[in-house]
Image: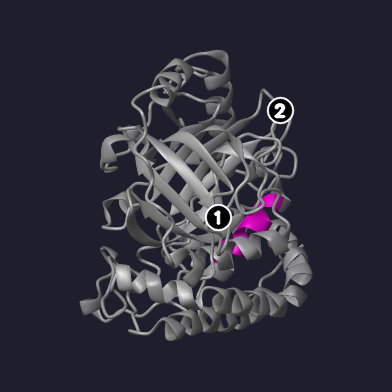
C-alpha cells in the first residue's frame, strides 16, 4: 500500500469509541492490546486494510499507555484460515509496546495450533542464546477486537529493515523462500531449481523494487549462483563452492535453532546486508509445527489417525531447503560443532527461563482456553494433545531435553574438518 493510501486510511472515518477497560485487564497478568475498527468492521482478509484505533495497556493498568490511529489486517497463510486470526497492525506514529523499541509495524501471532502458547518463545530464546543477529522480540498479550475478547496472542516485531530490527545497508535485501509466492506482488525463481523467493526488503508493495530492475537482477543472480555452486561438481571447494556465497556461521546458528526445535515447517528468511556481503540465514520465524507437535507421513503431512509419532531421535534438516546439502560438508559440520559447544552450557538456563515464563502466563492461558476451548482436540496436522495446558508445556520442555540429548550424541559422531 502506498503512503498516500495509508494517509487516506488514517484520515478516514471517525473511529468508534473503544469499550471501557474491563476487569480482565487486571485479572490475567499480561498487557492488553485493544483494537476497535471504524464502524466495527470485521477483520477477515490480508487485502482489506481496516482503519482502527489501537490502545495499549500495561499489565493491570486501567488507562492506556498510548492511543493511536492505525490500520489492521489479517496476516499469515495457513494460519489465517484458523478461527483465531493472526493480525498485522500499522500505527499512525511510532510507539513502544512492552518496552520494545518504538515502531509503527507490529504483529500479533495467534498461536492457535500451539496449545502450550510457548513454542515461539522457546525458539526465539534459542535464537538469542545462539547469537543470531536479529531475534524477534516477543511478549504475551491479551487482545480485544471491537470489545470482543480474542484470547492470548504473542506481540512480536515485524521482520523488516530497521535500525532496531534487521540492520541492513540501503543496498541490502531481506528475502523469503516462499511457497505462497504467487500471493505476493513480486517474486523471482532461481535458474537451477526454480525455487521461489519473495521480498521483505526492498518493498515491492511500494515499487521500491520491480521485476527486471538492477536490484531485482542482482539478488536473483546471486541466489542462482549460490545454487549452482551448491549443486555443482565441487560444492565444498572453499573458493568457488557454496561457501563463496553464504555466511557459514549464521547458517550454522540458524540450523542449531531449527534442529533443537524440531521445526517441521519454518519460514525461510535470508539476509544480504549489502552487495558486498554474503547471504545470511535468518531471522528465525514460525514455530507452529515444532517441539514434537507434527511429523510427515509418506504422502506429506501426517494425520493423527495414521498413528505416526513426532520424531525425537532423528534429524529434521531434510525439511529445510539447502541444509541437507550444506550439512554434507565436513567443514560446515565443524562450524556447527563449534557453535553447539558455545550453546550447550546455556541450555539449562533456557529451561529455567521458560518455566518462569509459563508461570507468568498461567492465569492468561486459562482465559485463552475459555475463549478457544480446544485443549481436548487435535488442531490441524498436530499429532498430540493432552487436554491440559500444564501437560502441553511439559511436553514441549521434555521434547527439547530429549531431542537435545539425541542431537548431542549424534553430532559427536559426525565427521568434520
Disc 1 crowd, CA 10 A, few/some/many (<14, 14-19, 20+): some
The boundaries of the magenta stretch are: 250-259
Q: Secondary structure at mark 1?
A: helix
**Within 10 Å of the Cα at label 2, are there few (<14), some (14-19), or many (20+) other Cα atoms?**
some
Residue in front for this viewpoint, 380 or 275: 380
Q: Which mark is residue 323?
A: 1
Query: In this figure, which colouring scheme has been used for the structure?
Result: one colour
| Residue 264 coordinates in the image, percent (x, y) | 43, 63
Mark yes or no: residue 363 visible.
yes
Quadrant assignment for the C terminus: bottom right
Kindly state the secondary structure of the residue where label 2 is placed: loop
Q: Is residue 24 left or right of residue 279?
A: left
Verify whether residue 33 appears in magenta: no
Q: Earlier in the sequence, mark 2 or mark 1?
A: 2
Q: Check contact, mark 2 vs mark 1: CB within 8 A.
A: no
Q: CA distance from mark 2 to mark 1?
A: 27 Å
Q: Position of residue 5 (x, y in %)?
A: 41, 19
Of the two numbered discs 2 and 1 in the rendering, the one whose residue sits closer to the viewer: 2
Nearest the eye: 396 or 177? 396
- Which numbered marker is on residue 396? none
Q: Please tell me which residue is depicted at 57% across the width and 63% down the height of the picture.
A: 59
Q: Residue, x 74% and y 60% (percent of image)?
A: 335
| Residue underneath mark 2 | 169
Q: Residue at x 35, y 50 (%)?
A: 145
Q: Nearer the viewer, residue 183 or 388?
A: 388
Q: Is residue 74 visible?
A: no
Amino acid at each position: 500500500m502506498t503512503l498516500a493510501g495509508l494517509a487516506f486510511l488514517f484520515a478516514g472515518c471517525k473511529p468508534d469509541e473503544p469499550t471501557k477497560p474491563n476487569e480482565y485487564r487486571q485479572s490475567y497478568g499480561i498487557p492488553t492490546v485493544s483494537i476497535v475498527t471504524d464502524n466495527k468492521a470485521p477483520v477477515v482478509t490480508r487485502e482489506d486494510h481496516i482503519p482502527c484505533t489501537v490502545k495499549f495497556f500495561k499489565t493491570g493498568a486501567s488507562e492506556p499507555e498510548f492511543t493511536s490511529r492505525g490500520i489492521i489486517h489479517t496476516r499469515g497463510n495457513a494460519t489465517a484460515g484458523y478461527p483465531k486470526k493472526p493480525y498485522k497492525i500499522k500505527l499512525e506514529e511510532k510507539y513502544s509496546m512492552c518496552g520494545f523499541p518504538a515502531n509503527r509495524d507490529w504483529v500479533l501471532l495467534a498461536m492457535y495450533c500451539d496449545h502450550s502458547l510457548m513454542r515461539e518463545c522457546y525458539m526465539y530464546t534459542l535464537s538469542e542464546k545462539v547469537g543470531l543477529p536479529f531475534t524477534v522480540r516477543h511478549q504475551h498479550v491479551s487482545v480485544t477486537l471491537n470489545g470482543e475478547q480474542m484470547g492470548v496472542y504473542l506481540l512480536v516485531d515485524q521482520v523488516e529493515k530497521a535500525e532496531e530490527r534487521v540492520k541492513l545497508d540501503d543496498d541490502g535485501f531481506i528475502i523469503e523462500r516462499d511457497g505462497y509466492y504467487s500471493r505476493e506482488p513480486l517474486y523471482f525463481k532461481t535458474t537451477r531449481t526454480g525455487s521461489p523467493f519473495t521480498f521483505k526488503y526492498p518493498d515491492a508493495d511500494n515499487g521500491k523494487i520491480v521485476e527486471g530492475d538492477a536490484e531485482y537482477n542482482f539478488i536473483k543472480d546471486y541466489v542462482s549462483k549460490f545454487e549452482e555452486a551448491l549443486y555443482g561438481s565441487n560444492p565444498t571447494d572453499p573458493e568457488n563452492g557454496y561457501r563463496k556465497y553464504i555466511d557459514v556461521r549464521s547458517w550454522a546458528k540458524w540450523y542449531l535453532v531449527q534442529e533443537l526445535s524440531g521445526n517441521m515447517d519454518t519460514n525461510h528468511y535470508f539476509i544480504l546486508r549489502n552487495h558486498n556481503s554474503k547471504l545470511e540465514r535468518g531471522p528465525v520465524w514460525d514455530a507452529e509445527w515444532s517441539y514434537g507437535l507434527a511429523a510427515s507421513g509418506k504422502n506429506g503431512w501426517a494425520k493423527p489417525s495414521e498413528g505416526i509419532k513426532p520424531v525425537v531421535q532423528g534429524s529434521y534438516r531434510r525439511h529445510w531447503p539447502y541444509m541437507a546439502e550444506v550439512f554434507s560438508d565436513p567443514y560446515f559440520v565443524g562450524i556447527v560443532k563449534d557453535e553447539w559447544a558455545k550453546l550447550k552450557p546455556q541450555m539449562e538456563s533456557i529451561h529455567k527461563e521458560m518455566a518462569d515464563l509459563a508461570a507468568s502466563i498461567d492465569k492468561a492461558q486459562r482465559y485463552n482456553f475459555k475463549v478457544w476451548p480446544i485443549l481436548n482436540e487435535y488442531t490441524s496436522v498436530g499429532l498430540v494433545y493432552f487436554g491440559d495446558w500444564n501437560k502441553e508445556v511439559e511436553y514441549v520442555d521434555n521434547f527439547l531435553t530429549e531431542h537435545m540429548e539425541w542431537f548431542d550424541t549424534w553430532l559427536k559422531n559426525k565427521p568434520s574438518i
